[in-house]
Image: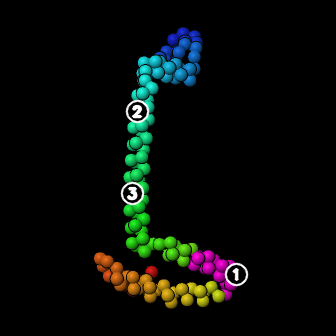
Amino acid sequence: MSRSRAGVSNDPYRPLGGSLVGAAVQHIKEEDETYNVSEEEEEEEEITFRQTEIETIEKVLALIDRSAEKRINEGFSDFNFTVGVLNCLLVSVTFCRYPQHFWLLYLIESLYLIPKGFWFNLRAKPLNQVLYYLDYCW
């Protein structure tokens, strides 16, 4: 910032000898004086804003409901979620408390989950995905 005289600024936004905060407050006061809004207009703006808010919230809730229905149709339910969390706890407890029997738990789960996965991949749409079991990296 260049100064033309000692203590005087060439910056149009900074008043003589004042700070930027003081200039901002002064600018806001000037704008408030030029923009006079009646109380009725303020209430109308608040009502319009509230109505817009309500419409937006209703749209968001409708999208959430559609997403929840889609997840339920894909098989995600409260029961499946609970079983998955309990399985996670069971695997953790077995690994920590009985590590010598951990392989048995995985064997028992595999006897159920691998055929179930095979069945779901067989019925997959649009393409049958059973051949993925022939992949070495699954």
- Numbered badge on residue 62: 3
Question: Alpha-carbon distance for marks 3 and 1?
Answer: 46 Å
Q: Is residue 14 above or below residue 104?
A: above
- Report the magenta residues as a range: 86-100
Classify 10 Å Cα crowding around label 2: few (below 14), some (14-19), many (20 and above). Answer: few
Question: Alpha-carbon distance for marks 3 and 2?
Answer: 27 Å
Q: Give the residue at x 55% y 13%.
A: 16
Classify mark 2: helix, strand or loop: helix
The residue identified by callout 1 is: 97
Name the spot of residue 42 as percent of width and height, x first: 43, 29
Q: Give the residue at x 65% y 88%.
A: 101
Q: In the current view of this chain or complex, which residue is farthest to the front?
A: 40
Asked whether residue 36 is in view, the answer is yes
Residue 107 image-quadrant placement? bottom right
- Numbered badge on residue 66: none
Residue 7 image-quadrant placement? top right
Circle 2: residue type:
Glu
Q: Give the residue at x 55% y 74%.
A: 82
- Numbered badge on residue 44: 2
Name the spot of residue 60 as percent of width and height, x first: 41, 53
